[in-house]
Image (tube, grey):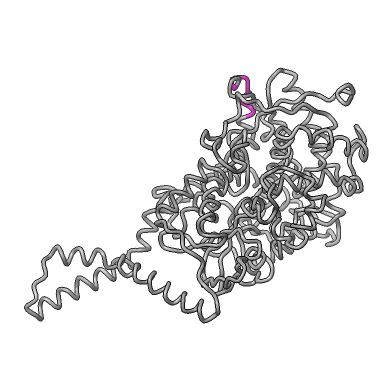
Amino acid sequence: MQVTMPLPPGPVYLLSRIPRFAIPSAIVYLSTRVVQQQTSLKVPSWVVFVASLLARPAIFYFQVLYGDIVNKREAVKHGAVLPPLVQESGLKVIQTMVENLKHGYPAEPFRRWAENYGHTYRIHLLTETALFTDDPDAIKAMLATQFEAFEKGPIFQDQVDALFGTGVFNSDGEMWKFHRGITRPFFTRERISDFDIYARNAGRSLKQAKKRLAEGYSIDFQDLVSRFTLDSATEFLFGHNVSSLSAGLPYPPSAAHLTPASYHTHPATIFTKAFTEGQLLASLRTGQGTEWRLFEFWKDKVTPLRKVMDTFTEPVIKEALEKEKREKEVKEEEEGTLLEYLVKQTQDPKILKDELVNLLVAGRDTTMGLITYSVYMLIQNPHIEPRLRQEIFDIVGPTARPTYDHMRKMRFVRAFLNEVLRLYPSVPVNVRKSNRAVLLPNSEPGQKPFYIPADTTLIYGVLNTHRRADLWGPDAQVFDPDRFLDERVHKYLTPNPFIFCPFNAGPRICLGQQFAYHEATFYLVKLLQHFTGFTLDEETNQPPLPEWASATDRKKDEKVHPITHLTLSVVGGFWIRMKELNPGDLD
């Protein structure tokens, strides 16, 4: 069978644009020649060449000007205004966003622009103008009250298609409803309250942590919990534990030679590496707009990584399909996994593989971020650890396994996790696209609403919303779980619930929200039953950028480097030490 090599993205992109550029240039050139032939007018050849070359850019420029005029008129007609426009070129905006995604602080450019332009504004992205907002009223409109007017949209879908395909995170319309309908029944209270999966995998991970710490080395806690969440997610969703914890733990870079080759060659390690790189590249595409192919000119960098990921998931799918063939007579209502139910609905290999990848992002990365930053906050706020442990011991006990009823009673544990999600949401920035012209609220008193044309990309910054002092109070930059328990709840959150959206909101709210809370709570309980004295390995962790020390917000307090590649993580791993808990430690 002959294998055809895919054409390079850059040349394909340019070829697709040739008619848009060539036709105006040809018209200018031919018109000039006709005029010269029929009149005595003599135009120098270089003038004809330059005019022909600039024909398309001139048309684009006037289209932008005309579009602004039309949009302003439409805004006035609707009693609205256009959001202010950031006065930077599209190329400069893209460079700023890409550099931030690679090396900066999550969502930092958006916060900086908001200081000058307000909480809803427009930015140029070469051939399109996008909108950013961290206004909870606008976010509420996008996610809930005007939900039908917004979708993921073709631009975002094109940017991340190589990674997510047509899975639930990257689909709209009927395809989204299909995925949503399939997954919803598997996140009922009964299913997500089966804690046997958490117990098995948490036990394995903590056992490995104890072993490595006993050797005198720090552990990459982020890697540890990513394996815990991956094993738990695959067992819960697919009935097939991929046993990523069996790869063991890596040694710190200073002792990297001790890390066995089997760790690097383990299928889960290979999958995780490809998964992480794929998310970084996909997130860079979102900052590069519709022109992302020009930045991957000769090679689509994500597709090979997705093939590596598919190699990991294909055996799981094959096993499920074979089981379906053997058990065609099984009744519909019989208990099974989500994957077993999915193969009853479709046997399209692309849909199956796409959905598995999408679910693994939800099941692994988001909860990994929550647990990782929970321990980071314990290290940053050591006075909170005894209080958390006291509640755990009072309700669960020093060794018992938490139950659903226990979790309902542990109010401070939930408040602690909420505060982690407030300052370090798993998905700091998200995207929608308007499918028709809409009006978004303007939270500035006495100001007109914002007019948003159809086909506008809208970026909303959950992290920035979560840290706004005017929404959360003057201590918004301070980590304080009690804000979810005391009078501040009624002062800030109750009247305006969209200031807190770590799991999105509206019809597309994360179905796995309670699953994530249960998993993170379970792990935190077992961790604090076994360990205390959490500290950073400052020699191994990648430090924050030096200029952050002079910042006026949370950046100045960071001891690690937070980064977002679709989901939030720590650059270079999260290397910590902790000691086993002894009865004397509680005195």
Q: Position of residue 95 (x, y in %)?
A: 43, 49
Left or right placement of residue 207 versus residue 179 in this view: right
Q: Position of residue 63 (x, y in %)?
A: 37, 71
Q: Position of residue 429 (x, y in %)?
A: 60, 53
Image height of 566 relative to 180, above or below: above
Q: Quadrant location of residue 197?
A: top right
Question: Residue lying furthest top in this view?
Answer: 215
- The span shown in magenta is 256-263
Residue at x-position 51% and y-position 42%: 102
Residue at x-position 53% and y-position 71%: 452
Q: Quadrant location of residue 184?
A: bottom right
Q: Is residue 446 magenta?
A: no
Q: Is residue 201 visible?
A: yes
Left or right placement of residue 146 versus residue 2 in this view: right
Left or right placement of residue 180 versus residue 349 in this view: right
Q: Is residue 424 visible?
A: no
Which image quarter holds the C terminus? top right
